[in-house]
Amino acid sequence: MEDYKEGENVLVTPKAETYDLDMEFEDGDEEADDLDMKNLSAKAWLVKLPTFLAKKWSEIEQEDVDLGCVRIHESGKIELILSDNKIYAEMPREYDLEITNTDVKDSYSFVLKRDENGMETGPVAIQATVHHNCYIRPYASDEYRQKVRQRTIEASQPKRTVQVMSPDENRGAYVPPGLQASSADNFGKFVSKKTKIPMEQKTTRMPKNELIDLLFQAFEEYAYWSLRGLKDYVKQPESYLKDVLTEIAILDKRGPYNNCYHLKPEYKRENEPTNDSIAPNGLEPPNGDSAMVIDDDDDEVEEEGNVEGGDEDEEFDDAELFGDGSD
């Protein structure tokens, strides 16, 4: 044990198994709890998990649940394979485990036992000494791409919604007694009203999840698209299209594909036969369908296909796609 200096933390090392912490408080004003260090020689790996996997494991309340196994290959490659438990439904099963630090210093895992009421039932104990720092990441499988897409849609759900009131609930403004109704009516003359745009001069937005699927379909045909080409393909307002593209695609600003969009790496399929050339303008989806969605933000008229009716769209806020994970 290194010498203890006032104002510093006690450094716990393998030589400190018989160290008495109470001896450090000579004045007796502070009380030091016992520290159980019988597992100090045990070795452990500190692994950083993706957020969705850490959350899933934290929700498990049963004991002795088979979470999975770690597979170490002769080449040195390490994988985490989840079990076939139903709790992993619609989740990636295979992950790459990479060791980032093989010489960790002064890092330990502690545990504090508590009863059902949250009261401490024993001293703080050292579970193990951390020897490796690691992190895992899922392979780019179909399950992982579906998980990322679903997380993007859920994170984009609006936190506030508009509630439409019925005629019975909409009672109008309160007019105090003594104030003539005509005076309240004349107040509207001082308020300028926005000129309504005729229906034939409005364009509408399709739901965001449908637009994302349509964009994925476009990038399966061509790897690179200009903004004009995508606008001709999906027939959506330009500002709305740009907002959605920032979530799933990258805009090249130099080179042979200057000012062209291509999918982010996490959305690309492995061994997918994609045309690496730039898509020409004026293309339409293979099924020839296009939707009309009303949007007051755009004044220009866009050509659409046959439409029987439009659904009201939802507006979304951008959210973080995939966090760094949690330990």
Image (cartoon, grey):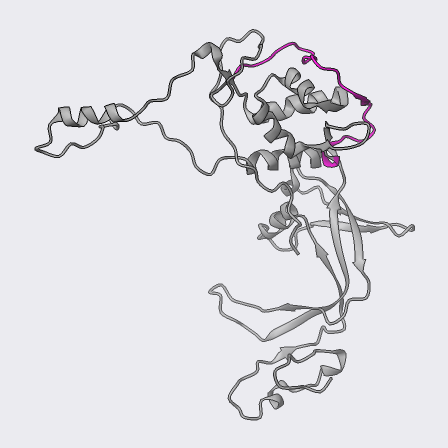
Figure check: 245 above or below 26: above
Specify the farthest residue to the right. 74
Q: Quadrant of the N terminus?
A: bottom right
Along the line of sight, which residue is nearer the eye, 39 or 251? 251
Q: Quadrant of residue 258?
A: top right
Figure check: 166 above or below 22: above
Q: Residue at x 76, y 21 (%)?
A: 222
x, y percent for residue 145: 70, 34
x, y percent for residue 274: 80, 23
Figure check: 81 above or below 177: below
x, y percent for residue 228: 67, 19
Q: Quadrant of residue 192?
A: top left
Give the overall secondary structure of the magenta segment: loop
Q: Which residues are magenta?
A: 265-293
Figure check: 146 above or below 55: above
Q: Residue at x 63, y 45 (%)?
A: 52
In the image, is residue 277 part of the stretch drawn in magenta?
yes
